[in-house]
Amino acid sequence: MAGKFRAVFFPIARQLKPVALLAAGLALAAVSACNTGSVLSLQPAVDVGAQTAAVPEYSSMQRLVPSNPDMMQAAYPRMDEPMSPVEQIPASEIDCRGELKRLGVTYTDVAPIHEGQCGIDYPVKVSAIGSVEMKPAATLTCNMAASFASWTRNELVPSARWRYFSGVRTIHQGSSYSCRNIAGEGVLSEHGKGNALDVMSIELNNGDDIDVRKPGLFAFRTRGFLNNVRADGCQYFTTVLGPGYNYDHRNHFHFDIKNRKSGYRACR
């Protein structure tokens, strides 16, 4: 077929202008390519398929959040599909975020967390309460974040100023959201709902770093401060457990807002 095409093409080519000749030459190249079956050269060098490994499905975004997320992974929709409609946040959650702003909380909204029986529908990640840093940032329900912020501003900071003549620089937390059961029991921990926070130490502006473990016999100021932490917390949380309660709480204070019947609070 190529021989017949050249027999027709070259007599005509002598009568064409250079531009037309070039176009005709390209047409010939296309015909030759089609005849050789060299179609693969038109495909991309790497076949990324329906989606790339680096761009997960938008519908799978909630699975990217680990049990105790210190680092969040970004999730984006596939470019060849429309973005799924965003679920409207309830009015109660909007009101709660307004309270966080009123309390001076620095936070970010993060992706919903669903891990079996654990999870948070509308989590927030708290990095500071006013000038008090939270290290590492704590992933919580908005209600737990608001309760903890209220306690920090109204009780913890004033108590530190009264006892140590210093403000609070940093709250060092050991666990916020974490999918697990209560130690030794088959009951889901409030950590698995985002309703709990464990405080390991409290760092003051004057450089003191107050470990919450049971203080020595003659550490009167520290003991008084930690007693205030425990007692005042019972006004804001339904559970306050700390050193002296049991071995599992020997090195931290556990605060949560577990919903109990008859308004019962466990402060030990």
Image (cartoon, rainbow, N blue to C red):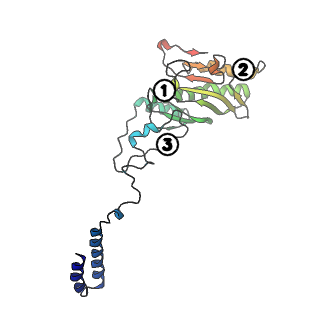
Give the camera-side residue of 212 and 67: 67
Residue occupying the point 70% across, 21% down? 214
Question: In this picture, is 23 found above or below 42?
Answer: below
Is residue 204 visible in the rendered structure shown here? yes
Q: What's the amino acid at mark 3?
A: Gln
Give coordinates of residue 19: x percent, y percent: 30, 82
Horizontally, is 142 left or right of 6 in the view?
right
Is residue 129 visible in the rendered structure shown here? no
The residue where tag 2 is placed is 223
Residue occupying the point 55% across, 30% down? 176
Give coordinates of residue 225: x percent, y percent: 69, 22
Give the position of the N terminus as an image quadrant. Answer: bottom left
Q: What's the amino acid at mark 2?
A: Arg
* Distance CA(mark 1)–CA(mark 3): 21 Å
- The image's mark for residue 74 is none
Give coordinates of residue 42: x percent, y percent: 34, 63
- The image's mark for residue 73 is 3
